[in-house]
């Protein structure tokens, strides 16, 4: 029996978990100031969510996804990135009908990519992301850059 963490994964021990919580809480506060709401999507999705959202020909879809069939024969994939899941949730839950548009969301989530583990590249990684849905205004891009710079400036 192998009692080590799977290759490409790490344990976040209590002393490090406190640091993660500190950073996450700081970023959550910044997101709140920018009026972004947190979203939490499932760890896995129907494979089609990623192949359609990310693109069939990308390296993520072609080589890096952890895909499996469930007992019903449906193809499921551990999420390799956040945008496709957030977009699926936006459409499925009809968030486009919310009175306040655009819908501004953020997430902290574990992502899974089957790649050769090396320094700085893990098979399970944690990602922070933001998505703004329901607007084509270029000011949204500027706001996302401003939010990212505000996060960055908190640690420089």
Image: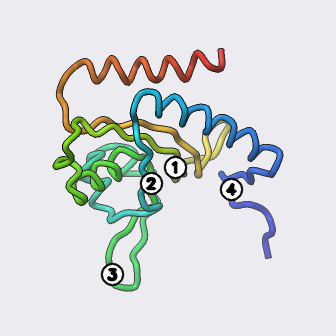
Residue located beneath label 2 in the image:
40
**If you read the primary sequence from the N terminus, does the residue marked by circle 4 or circle 2 appear first?**
4
Distance from label 3 to label 2 (Cα)?
Answer: 26 Å
Quadrant (top left, top right, bottom left, bottom right) of the N terminus: bottom right
Which mark identifies residue 7?
Answer: 4
The reply to whether discs 4 and 2 touch (Cβ–Cβ < 8 Å) is no
The reply to whether discs 3 and 2 touch (Cβ–Cβ < 8 Å) is no
Which mark identifies residue 109?
Answer: 1
Q: Is residue 109 above or below residue 29?
A: below
Q: Circle 1 sits in a helix, a strand or a loop, which is it?
A: strand
Judged by depth in the image, the label closer to the viewer, 2 or 1, is: 2
Rendered residue at 43%/63% (across/down): 44
Q: How crowded is mark 4: few (under 14 residues within 10 Å), some or many (20 or more)?
A: few
Q: Is residue 141 above or below residue 41?
A: above
Rendered residue at 20%/37% (across/down): 134
Q: How crowded is mark 3: few (under 14 residues within 10 Å), some or many (20 or more)?
A: few
Distance from label 1 to label 3 (Cα)?
Answer: 26 Å
Question: Residue 94 appears at what percent x and percent y?
Answer: 20, 55
Rendered residue at 33%/43% (across/down): 58
Distance from label 4 to label 2 (Cα)?
Answer: 26 Å
Viewer-closest of 63 and 141: 141
- Residue found farthest to the front: 99
């Amino acid at each position: 029996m192998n009692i080590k963490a799977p290759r490409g994964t790490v344990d976040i021990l209590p002393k490090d978990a406190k640091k993660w919580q500190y950073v996450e809480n700081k970023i959550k506060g910044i997101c709140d100031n920018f009026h972004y709401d947190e979203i939490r999507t499932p760890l896995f999705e129907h494979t089609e969510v990623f192949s359609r959202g990310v693109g069939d020909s990308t390296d993520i879809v072609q080589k890096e996804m952890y895909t499996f069939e469930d007992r019903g024969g449906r193809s499921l994939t551990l999420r390799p990135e956040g945008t496709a899941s957030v977009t699926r949730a936006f459409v499925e839950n009809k968030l486009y009908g919310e009175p306040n548009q655009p819908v501004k969301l953020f997430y902290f989530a574990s992502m899974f990519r089957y790649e050769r583990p090396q320094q700085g590249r893990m098979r399970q990684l944690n990602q922070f992301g933001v998505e703004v849905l329901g607007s084509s205004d270029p000011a949204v891009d500027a706001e996302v850059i401003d939010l990212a710079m505000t996060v960055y400036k908190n640690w420089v």
